[in-house]
Amino acid sequence: MEFGFSEGQKKLMAEMREFCMNEIPEDYDPEYSGRFQEAETLEFWKQFHQKGVEKGWPTAGWPKKYGGMGLSAIEQAAIASEMSYWGARWGGIMAMSLVAPTILAAGTDEQREKWVPPIARGEITAFEAFTEPDAGSDEANVQLRAVPDGDEYVLNGQKTFISGGVKPDWLYTLCKTADVTPKHRGLSIFMVPGDAPGVSYRPLPTMGGSQQNEIFYDNVGVPKENLVGELNRGFYLAMTTFEFERAAGGGLGARRSMEKIMEYARQEKLNDKPLYKDPKARDMLARMAVHQHLGFLFGWYTAWHRSQREKLGPQHYNSGTLWARLWQEFDGEHMRRVFGMYTQLKQKSKYAKYHGRPGRTWEYMHAHHAAGSPEIRRVVIADRGLGLPRIPRQFNVQINEALRQG
């Protein structure tokens, strides 16, 4: 199947390409720099965002009423594709990609007016604060409790593995607000100020190199007006958020990585011959090219489905996000076979091969939890995609007991 773009879409992509070439420093290496979250890096992307706002690019697919250009998700993906090629990103990306789309899809008119325009302008940063020590895969088991107290709700509990490198303006927080059965009908979402009294953070470095956080809520007061959507309907909002998080179309920008490693394979020598002539290297490059193209197809399918959301409804499952994780694992294993012990070197090592990307890929392939592990994604596909029956609860209990007994 051949994909094509309209003249308007081609023009938009060309403008975005020129913008990135002009604004991003020549020595910026997306294979390396994209992983870091230092304050100066975040400030650069914030300024980059502000320049993009003048064109309307960060939120091209949003309604004009809320700071967008009123274009479709295809145009939004076209912009994202060009940005991904250059390793660029907008400031406050989690607020833009997760919080605002959910509020646009399921929030009230008042909430859209309050939250979405400042997010579009890049004025707000936010963390998605859902996961807890016993509530990640089992999201309905959230224990962070929100209790009404006059004009406020008072929050107590903990979140863990929350992505982000600096203190956010807001915490998009999933809470328990009712003791009911089934549990998922007693959850709600609040926008909690990131610097509210009683909120504290503890860094949680990961093998994958990203900065995660443990976040603690100790008698944190939140105005009732900060409730997002309806009381005790937070689980359904969280599922909408996951729709956007797991449908990010991550394969759109892998072309540059493929170009770079092909260039490297032509220049690097192995046994006095170009690397690309080595059988193991050729196998690796061929597989990576196939993986990259499959990611590309999944990404554009996701963009198309989102552009048709009003007609087709939400995308209940996304095979592309599962493939993206498996793709990382496949590529990491093949790089290990080709680069051997060099795969264990960090990117900053002067002895690292190919700018340290083999080591970085090896790290990534051990960091699968974000937005749901591959196992959880398979469960979602089996349930929502294939309509397979769930295991009865009593069998789950028996299986867990057998596992505990060894």
Image (spheres, rainbow, N blue to C red):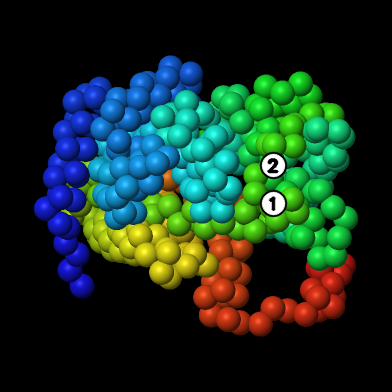
Tell whether 379 sits left or right of 47: right
Image quadrant in which the N terminus is located? bottom left
- State yes or no: discs 1 and 2 in contact (Cβ < 8 Å): yes
Residue at screen point 30% across, 38% down: 57
As shown in the figure, which amino acid type bears the numbered disc 1? Glu
The local secondary structure at tag 2 comes to strand
Residue at screen point 79% across, 29% down: 221
Residue at screen point 56% across, 53% down: 106
* Residue toward you, 173 or 135: 173
Q: Which mark is residue 121?
A: none
Q: Position of residue 150 (x, y in %)?
A: 86, 33
Q: Which mark is residue 230?
A: 1
- Name the image quarter holding residue 127: top right
Q: Is 53 located above or below residue 71 in the figure?
A: above
Q: Is 324 located above or below residue 64 in the figure?
A: below
Q: Position of residue 262 (x, y in %)?
A: 20, 48
- Name the image quarter holding residue 232: bottom right
The local secondary structure at tag 1 comes to loop
Q: Position of residue 369 (x, y in %)?
A: 59, 51
As shown in the figure, which amino acid type bears the numbered disc 2? Leu
* Residue toward you, 175 or 135: 175
Q: Which mark is residue 227?
A: 2
* Residue toward you, 129 or 295: 129
Q: Is 396 located above or below residue 223 in the figure?
A: below
Tell whether 242 sits left or right of 283: right
